[in-house]
Image (spheres, rainbow, N blue to C red):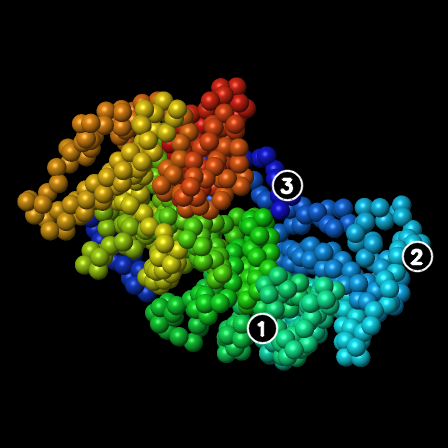
């Protein structure tokens, strides 16, 4: 799935400016903050509020240095290619392509085996079946289809001598041949059964998709309809596999009446192997998110049945809409129902959830769902281009993911190996953090350049949409005070610290002026709900972070170049483990001192600027250690990876296999920096969900676009 086409155009940010006015008088300040607190509590804007068009100041930072993944090109089975744009039909186009690909990959081998079995059984019966033999020969010598006359070749093959067959065996063989022949014809014709909830009929038929599939439009309960169709379709497939197994035994003369008859008389789909289930043409159900929640009981019934039905659920709700019949405060405290977690709660269900911004990831997720031998849910956020008002749909998809509104989730219940995980979040933006963090660049009113650290929250995502941005209250700089705190910080405060505080997010107007916008309490509650859900997902995925001084800090500060004098990898790991324990102790001691405000527990801040003590007998390891202060003060060194923090997401080793390898614990390291480019290192760092890849300084001073690449690499070094 590497057919992606990309532009080479980097994203240029609109220059931002920040003008700070002189502070207002005390009377003006009190009057404004009275209105501001009323707005926060009620969500009602003051009548004299100056309205202007604003949007999130962080939106452009989500795809910094990246171009759109669309149009996306896929290779068709006829040797042609198809270009797919991001629109409301994109999920159907991907699904149609993968259903055909899935069927073709299974069909060639299986139909060949069926034909060979039919030919073999006919020889046992001394029945000359030229058609079956021709089919068998064609599958064996498909490379010479135009060179060999298979109809004449069949007549040259030697015939078996007639064997004495009992009446029971003769009847059994005749029935098996008939079933295999019917199955062979049926298997060639049908790729899948697609059940459509009626609202999607027009989109499917308009695109002329699923030409080789049976399309079923239903006005009844779609989940019950899918279960009934599966029972019907799998019954004939079970008969085919039953005949296939009996034929295999008969050809080898291993069928024992006293052993096998009773077994095959009670043969059901539960006895199918995973390989055999993957040969079954999938039953696919396509529904809308709203339809699913209106039929939760039958949805749960389908999942609990353990039938391998594939459910494609489409979400077109860009933001959560509260119940209009409820008071705003009650509505704001409603929890967003999560389809992915409903599926995971059934334990046996494969789940894939994603926006449509990364087509390769979508193809991989749908493919995994089609291969699943248990029920599967593919939950996709479907863009409605009409609602984007000139914005790039893929950018909106990235924003909904970054804001934790629509996390990317993968759950594979069959993954039980020690090195693997059933639950994966590695495709999310800055997965190890509560909210993605970015550095806003702006020019102050005095001409100085400013860098402002800001988090992209669910409120920042809502501010992208004009109708929601109107619900914000802009705070002129003359009214700034210590009580105005960023929303991400506000959500971290204890209850007692919230009094008097008003949360804000950064927005920009149409001219690029950077502004603070206060958010109402109803927004804060919804942001807290999204954050709680995200933290729950991270706990399920086993994702944690070690923090010192409030920031995620890599524990591994050890150089990994060829100049290392460490005698063994074991010594290195022991030292790193010791450093990690000391770092956690430092953080704990500092936290205790702050909470207790006790001089006896005050931590010696000067000690933080010193190197941690090492054993005297380890001079080689002492030489290797580099403190954070040394790293920032000295020149940037070569590339390196915090291997211990690697989440084994496969992102770097798949895209840049010459640069990155896995160690025995399936954690990444840089094999040889000279085997790749500095651009590849920077891109790998930008994609790394754990943020553990550091591009360092470029090795080749003549590499193109170095100035831009070095600037992009700064945040990772």
Mark 3 near mark 2, Cβ–Cβ under 8 Å? no
Image quarter hosting the C terminus: top left
> x and y percent of residue 310 in the render?
59, 66
> x and y percent of residue 519 in the render?
35, 56
Mark closer to the observer (3, 2): 2
The residue that mark 2 highlights is 155
Q: Residue at x 50, y 66 (%)?
A: 349
Q: SS class of the residue under badge 3?
A: loop
For this rendering, which residue is in front, 423 or 3?
A: 423
**Mark 1 vs 2, N-terminal side:** 2
Q: SS class of the residue under badge 1?
A: helix
Query: Disc 1 to disc 2, how far (Cα)?
Result: 42 Å
Q: Which residue is drawn at 54% across and 24% down?
A: 704
Give the residue furthest to the front.
Answer: 164
Quick one: label 3, few (<14), some, or many (20+) residues within 10 Å? some
Q: In this view, does 631 lie to the left or right of 271?
A: left
Q: Which residue is drawn at 16% across and 44% down?
A: 590
Residue 199 found in image quarter = bottom right
Q: Which mark is residue 270?
A: 1
Q: Residue 296 carries which label?
A: none
The residue that mark 3 highlights is 5
Q: In this view, does 546 lie to the left or right of 514?
A: left
Q: Is residue 701 above or below residue 262?
A: above
Residue 404 found in image quarter = bottom left
> x and y percent of residue 358 in the render?
55, 49
Q: SS class of the residue under badge 2?
A: helix
> x and y percent of residue 341 in the render?
44, 65
**Mark 1 vs 3, N-terminal side:** 3
């Amino acid at each position: 799935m590497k057919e992606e086409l990309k532009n080479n155009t980097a994203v240029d940010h609109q220059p931002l400016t920040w003008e700070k006015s002189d502070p207002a008088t005390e009377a003006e300040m009190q009057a404004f903050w009275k209105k501001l607190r009323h707005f926060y509590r009620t969500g009602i804007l003051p009548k004299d509020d100056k309205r202007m068009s604003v949007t999130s100041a962080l939106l452009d930072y989500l795809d910094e240095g990246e171009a759109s993944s669309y149009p996306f090109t896929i290779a068709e089975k006829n040797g042609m290619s198809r270009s797919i744009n991001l629109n409301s039909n994109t999920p159907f186009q991907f699904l149609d392509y993968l259903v055909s690909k899935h069927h073709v990959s299974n069909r060639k081998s299986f139909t060949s085996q069926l034909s060979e079995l039919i030919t073999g059984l006919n020889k046992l019966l001394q029945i000359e079946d030229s058609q079956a033999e021709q089919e068998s020969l064609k599958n064996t010598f498909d490379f010479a289809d135009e060179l060999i006359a298979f109809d004449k070749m069949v007549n040259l093959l030697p015939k078996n001598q007639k064997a004495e067959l009992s009446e029971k065996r003769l009847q059994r063989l005749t029935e098996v041949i008939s079933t295999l022949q019917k199955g062979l014809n049926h298997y060639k014709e049908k790729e899948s059964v697609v059940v459509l909830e009626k609202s999607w009929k027009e989109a499917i038929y308009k695109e002329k998709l699923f030409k080789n599939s049976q399309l079923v439009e239903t006005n009844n309960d779609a989940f019950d309809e899918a279960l009934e169709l599966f029972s019907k379709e799998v019954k004939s497939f079970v008969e085919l596999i039953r005949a296939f197994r009996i034929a295999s035994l008969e050809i080898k003369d291993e069928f024992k009446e006293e052993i096998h008859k009773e077994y095959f008389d009670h043969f059901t789909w539960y006895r199918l192997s995973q390989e055999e289930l993957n040969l079954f043409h999938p039953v696919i159900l396509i529904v809308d998110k709203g339809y699913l929640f209106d039929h939760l009981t039958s949805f749960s019934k389908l999942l609990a049945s353990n039938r391998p039905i594939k459910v494609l659920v489409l979400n077109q709700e860009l933001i959560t809409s509260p119940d209009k019949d409820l008071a705003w405060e009650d509505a704001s405290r409603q929890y967003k129902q999560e389809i992915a977690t409903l599926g995971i709660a059934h334990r046996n269900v494969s789940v894939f959830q994603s926006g449509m911004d990364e087509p390769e990831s979508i193809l991989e997720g749908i493919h995994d769902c089609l291969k699943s031998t248990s029920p599967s849910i593919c939950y996709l956020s479907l863009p409605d281009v009409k609602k984007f008002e000139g914005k790039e749909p893929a950018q909106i998809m990235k924003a909904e993911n970054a804001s934790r509104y629509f996390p990317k989730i993968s759950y594979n219940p069959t993954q039980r190996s020690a090195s693997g995980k059933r639950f994966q979040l590695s495709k999310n933006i800055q997965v190890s953090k509560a909210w993605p963090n970015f550095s806003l660049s702006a020019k102050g009113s005095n001409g100085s350049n400013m860098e402002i650290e800001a988090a992209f929250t669910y409120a920042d995502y809502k501010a992208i949409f004009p109708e929601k941005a109107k619900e914000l209250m802009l705070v002129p700089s003359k009214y700034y005070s210590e009580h105005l705190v960023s929303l991400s910080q506000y959500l971290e405060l204890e209850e007692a610290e919230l009094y008097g505080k008003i949360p804000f997010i950064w927005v920009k107007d149409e001219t690029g002026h950077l502004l603070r916008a206060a958010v109402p309490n109803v927004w804060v509650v919804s942001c807290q709900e999204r954050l709680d859900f995200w933290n729950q997902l991270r706990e399920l995925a086993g994702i944690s972070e070690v923090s010192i001084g409030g920031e995620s800090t890599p524990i591994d500060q050890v150089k990994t170049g060829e100049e290392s004098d460490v005698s063994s990898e074991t010594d290195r790991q022991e030292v790193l483990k010791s450093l990690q324990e000391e770092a956690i102790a430092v953080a704990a001691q500092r936290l205790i001192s702050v909470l207790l405000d006790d001089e006896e527990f005050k931590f010696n801040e000067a000690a933080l600027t010193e190197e941690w003590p090492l054993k005297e007998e380890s001079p080689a390891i002492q030489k290797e250690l580099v403190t954070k202060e040394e790293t920032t003060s000295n020149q940037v060194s070569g590339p390196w990876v915090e291997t211990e923090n690697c989440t084994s997401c496969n992102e770097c080793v798949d895209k840049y296999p010459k640069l990155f390898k896995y160690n025995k614990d399936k954690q990444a390291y840089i094999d040889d920096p000279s085997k790749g480019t500095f651009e590849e290192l920077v891109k790998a760092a930008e994609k790394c969900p754990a943020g553990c890849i550091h591009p360092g300084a470029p090795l080749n001073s003549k590499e193109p676009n170095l100035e831009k690449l070095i600037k992009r690499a700064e945040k990772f070094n």
